[in-house]
Amino acid sequence: MSASDLHLPAGARFDPTAGGAACLTAAWARHWRAHPDAKAIHDPDHGWLSRGDLDRESATRAGRLASLGLAAGDRVLLSAESSADLVIGYVAALRLGLVVIPTNTAYGPRELEHVVTDAGPRAAIVDDPDKRAALERIAPGLPVLTPALELPDGPAPRLDAVTPESAALIGYTSGTTGRPKGAVLSHANCLASAEGLRLAWRWTEADRLLLALPLFHMHGLGVGLHGTLYNGATAVLYRGFRADEILSEIEARGATLFFGVPTMYHRLASHPAAKALAKLRLCVSGSAPLPASLHEEIEGVSGQRVLERYGMTETLMLVSNPHDGERRAGTVGLPLPGVELRLEGAPPEIQVRGPNVFDGYWERPDANAEAFTDDGWFRTGDLGAIDEEGYVSIVGRAKELIISGGYNVYPREIEDVLRTRPEIEDVAVVGEADPEWGERVVAYAVTTEPVALEDLRAELGDALAPFKHPRALYPVDALPRNALGKVQKHRLAKGEVLPD
Ligand code: MCA
Ligand code: AMP
């Protein structure tokens, strides 16, 4: 028995094809047809949507999308806050075989333009009127719809008919370096991951997830929403995270599951009502390291032992602490069913293979050549260690990446924007340790005249989403460099070069 078999319930076997499902929506439809009256998704404004509602409404809206001339394989950009309409629109798009590009609602016009230019969507579904107007400027003629897809109904199209190898999603991520790339996830990738998590986390239709994560990243979408639909379970959606709301809703909603990023757990742990977490069957943390001290603190205040897991946009979930068995603080646990993991090189990089791992980035042969080894393993850019019992720890990153509150921020993207300012001669952006955010974005700059952080942030405006803005600006006479002229970012991150 391998260490990762510890994830499987007694007698269970991992089937990456999820019982031979053709595509995600075909797998979800099994539950819709079995119990159409059962609850599915709770919308903060409109209450419960049943499984039958989801089936019927998504079919109707797939017809509307088809009437625009959209067909299997076409890309559609999706950027909206959580709502029943967003879920129905997303399901409708997948049922038609469209490839959905979930896009962060904080993105400004410059970031949206990159995605549109790179992925060439044939339609966009966007809730924010300013963003809709921006898209109409960026891509004249692109149909830009609201999440309700307010269009005339069209004839019933063929639904749930794509093959497992078909693309389902393109998730934008910067990976190791450079401008954001679209990771293409197939239906098979998503099904394999959902089946692995069903087994590992003992997810059943009796589960109810409080889902306060945004639905435009894989944590909320590929884990939270897909898992809910795949298991015929229920999810309560929130537009944003408020610790008091989550804690008071645990009992009121009869919730069993909560998934969050460490920043959310930091806020939950310090809330006077934190004890309510004890009523949940399972709390999962991911997207950024959960400090061992926070892990212990949550257990101290609530008795709940959080299960930490590790994943990526390109791979969905890779490694998880066990449901039954020791949840070891400071580690991400054991490879999930079907996932092969190895450490290669010095320092040791985590490399992975498995049915959940994507095949490559959208139209980026250059990036694919870098991302995969010659023998077909995906290079995560994370540095790892494995202990005697097979528990994996993430000990660092080979890639230049800051994770702030679970959002990935790429220093180069920010430095490039800051360098366009005439008074900034030289700049380096790093992640500074922060108890709430994990890391916060800070800039060290050599400037020709004093620059106020507030002015800088105001002027960054549309160029960068606010979560990427530096939270501190440290003026320095010169950036520390090594003999090869490379900025010594590790020294900046440790605060060794802070001005007086
Ligand atoms: C919001 N702000 C942030 C962040 N979030 N600043 C830095 N880092 C952040 N993560 C800023 C806003 O720009 C705003 O700034 C101010 O905080 C208030 O905004 P608000 O939305 O009210 O913030 P919040 O409610 O406090 O948000 C914190 C949050 C949120 C709930 C932790 O960041 C969040 O939902 N994070 C989860 C992201 C996620 O899903 N990541 C998964 C990706 P100002 O007022 O100055 O403008 S990774 C992934 O998917 C892989 C597969 C994986 O492993 O999971
Ligand atoms: P993304 O590409 O946005 O999906 O982010 C994936 C990255 O988040 C990984 O490569 C890791 O660096 C990081 N990550 C995700 N989960 C964890 C975790 N539990 N501990 C540490 N880092 C994590």
Image (spheres, rainbow, N blue to C red):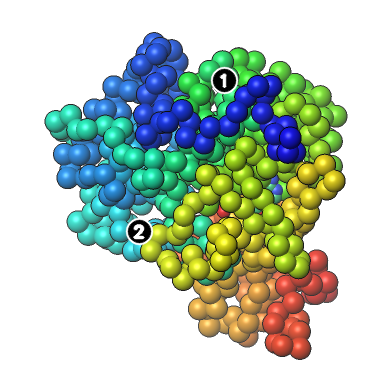
Q: Quadrant of the C terminus?
A: bottom right
- Secondary structure type for disc 2: helix
Residue position for label 2: 119
Q: What is the quadrant of residue 478 in the picture?
A: bottom right
Q: Is residue 42 visible?
A: no
Q: Nearer the viewer, mark 2 or mark 1?
A: 1
Residue type for callout 1: Thr
What's under tag 2, amino acid-wise? Answer: Ala
Q: Circle 2: is it few (<14), some (14-19), or many (20+) Cα within 10 Å?
A: many
Decide: is 132 above or below 487. Answer: above
The quarter in which the N terminus is drawn is top right
Q: Up-down: is 285 above or below 421?
A: above
Query: Residue 73: percent from the left, percent from the top?
Result: 29, 48
Residue under the point 30% across and 58% down: 120
Name the one closer to the observer, 248 or 235: 235
User: Can you tell which mark lies on residue 204?
Assistant: 1
Label 2 close to label 1 by CB (< 8 Å): no
Hey, which quadrant is residue 401 in on the image?
Answer: bottom right
Q: Residue placed at 59% from the left, 80% from the top?
A: 424
> As rendered, which of 236 and 62 lies closer to the eye?
62
- Left or right of 408 in this view: 463: left
* Residue 53 percent across, percent down from the top left: 34, 19
Q: Total of numbered circles in the picture? A: 2
Please, which residue is most extreme toward the front here? 1
